[in-house]
Structures are given as structure tokens and as C-alpha cells.
Image (tube, grey):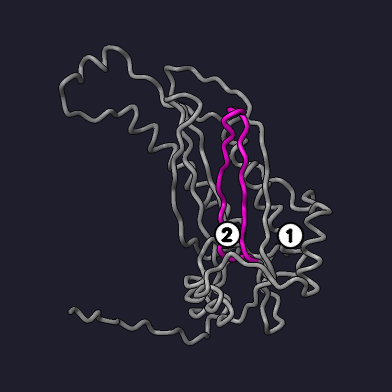
Amino acid sequence: MSTPGYQQVQVSEIARGRLDGSRQGRPCFTSDLSVNEFVLVTESGFEPLGMVMGTSVYHVGVQYGGWKTSQELGILTQAMYNVRELAMSRMEAEAAELGADGIVGVTLRPVNYAFMSDVIEFFATGTAVKATDGTNYRAPNGKPFTTSLNGQDFWTLWQHGWLPRRLVLGNCVYHVAHQTMRQMLSQVGQNAEMPQFTQALYDARELAMARMQYEGQQLGADGIVGTFVNDHRFWGEHAVEFFSMGTAVSRVRPDVNPVKPTMTMPLNR
């Protein structure tokens, strides 16, 4: 699966004007972190530089598959991957303009337009941060690191010597074949597994997870945390997209003395 080139992404002039103001300290920084998250990110040795965002409005093409065959719809899979990558790449480009080491608290959400059923927008936001000790903590590819982890999880990860590298994605749009009339009639009034559907949905989830894991391996990460798998049904009742996302992480401070968690028992009245 191809990934849009980072160098092709440009920051708009309007965005550059806002970012220039943040870089020069006017106005004050912006952030979507909560108060607790803000404090813990700064306690980790990173200062917020400003909110960064990226978006992509994408026309989704048409693909037809045989209704009797369960199969991936490759054109639709690629379209849904590209629109997310473009949104994230523009957010990363804004963070690079600010001189950030990374982006924390990233959200990536879809926006559907009722008046354009074949058009979808993905919108990525997060808070750009920079290390206060002067060390460069960008990913090995030179981009700011990205993570959907909140401030508390970022602090815990850092205290144990780990650092996010990038949000990694995997997806698969899959057409689930209809059951034959004979199969449907044979199961009327019975509790029975539907193996055709089971196998199709299992395969689709596995493809999405495998692609996310491959992205992490390409980054040289040690692992992926905060992974989730979502499903979204569209393009008719027999098409489904499975989408997986997580934060690829590397251990950058193996000699750190980790903070030991303590148990707090509530006092019942």
C-alpha cells in the first residue's frame, strides 16, 4: 500500500501566518490538552508550541465486486488509506513549521457530507510539543513523532524510557458475499454459525492489523501501543471497512529509573 510523500505536502499561506505567530510567541500558544494533560506533558520535559491540524477532502471512487465472492475492494481500501495519510501529513507539516519534536493527543476523525455521498473528509488535530532540554526527539525519518496517547499516558511512557515514533495505520474495505438461498433456508429457526460471514470478517480484520504492524516494522519501532480496531459499514449493506491504529514506540532511554505505580484504596463511607 503506497503512502503519499511527505515532501509533497505544503502548508497553506493562511496556516503559515498563524504558525509564524505561534513560533514568535504571539499570541500565546494554543492546545487541545486538558489541564492535567498539559501539566504532565510539561513535567515530561516538553513544552507545547501550538495546535496543529491537517485535513483532506477525498472523492471515493467506485468499485464493483461479484456478489457471490467475499473479497477485498482494493480501490476503496487505497482511497480510505490515502485520505487519512494526507490529513496526518499536513498536520505533521504544520508541526515541522513550528520546529516541534512531536505531536501529542492526536485525533483523526471522519466527516461525512449528506449532500455528497461519495465524498469524505478526514480531519487530524493535535498539540505540537518540543523538548526543553534541547535534544532532538524527532523520529528517525526526520518527521515530528505523532501519538494519540493523552498527556497521562505520554508521561507514563516517557517515565519508563519509551518515546512515540508515529501513529501507524492499517485498513481494509471488504465485500462480504451474500448467502445462497439454500444456506439461508437451512438455518431458519436454528442457532448456527454463519461461516462465510465469519471468515470474511476475520480476514478483513487480519489484513488491517497486518498492515498496521508492517508500518511499525518499517519505522524500526519496538512495538505498538494503544491499538484499536474499528469497523465502518458503507457502500451497501455488504461492504465494511476495518481500520486499525496505534502508536509505534521505541525505547530511547534504557537506563531510566521507572516510576513505580502505587495503589490507592478508596475510603468508603
Q: Most extreme residue toward the top, as rendered?
A: 181
- Picture coordinates of residue 208, whole percent (x, y): 49, 43
Residue 27's place in the image compared with 114, above or below, is: below
* Neighbour tally class for label 2: few under 14, some 14-19, many 20 plus, Cα within 10 Å: many
Q: Residue 94 carries which label?
A: 1
- Picture coordinates of residue 49, whole percent (x, y): 69, 71
| SS class, disc 1 | helix
Is 110 contained in the magenta span? yes
Q: In which quarter of the image is the N terminus?
A: top right
Left or right for 229, reference 190: right
The quadrant in which residue 15 appears is bottom right
* Neighbour tally class for label 1: few under 14, some 14-19, many 20 plus, Cα within 10 Å: many
Residue at 54%, 66% (x, y): give it: 249
- Picture coordinates of residue 268, whole percent (x, y): 19, 78
Magenta highlight range? 102-127
Residue at 66%, 63% (x, y): give it: 51
Which amino acid lies under the numbered mark 2 shown in the image of this protein?
Val
Left or right for 104, reference 36: right
Q: Between residue 60 and residue 51, name the one nearer to us.
A: 51
Give the mark nearest the N terminus, 2 or 1: 1
Q: Most extreme residue toward the bottom, as rendered?
A: 257
Residue at 45%, 17% (x, y): give it: 67
Is 68 contained in the magenta span? no
Asked if marks 2 and 1 touch (Cβ < 8 Å), the reply is no
| SS class, disc 2 | strand
**How would you classify the magenta stretch by its main secondary structure?**
strand
Q: Between residue 239 and residue 211, name the one nearer to us.
A: 239
Left or right for 219, reference 157: right
Q: Residue 106 carries which label?
A: 2
Q: Residue 135 carries which label?
A: none
Which amino acid lies under the numbered mark 1 shown in the image of this protein?
Glu
- Picture coordinates of residue 119, whole percent (x, y): 63, 32
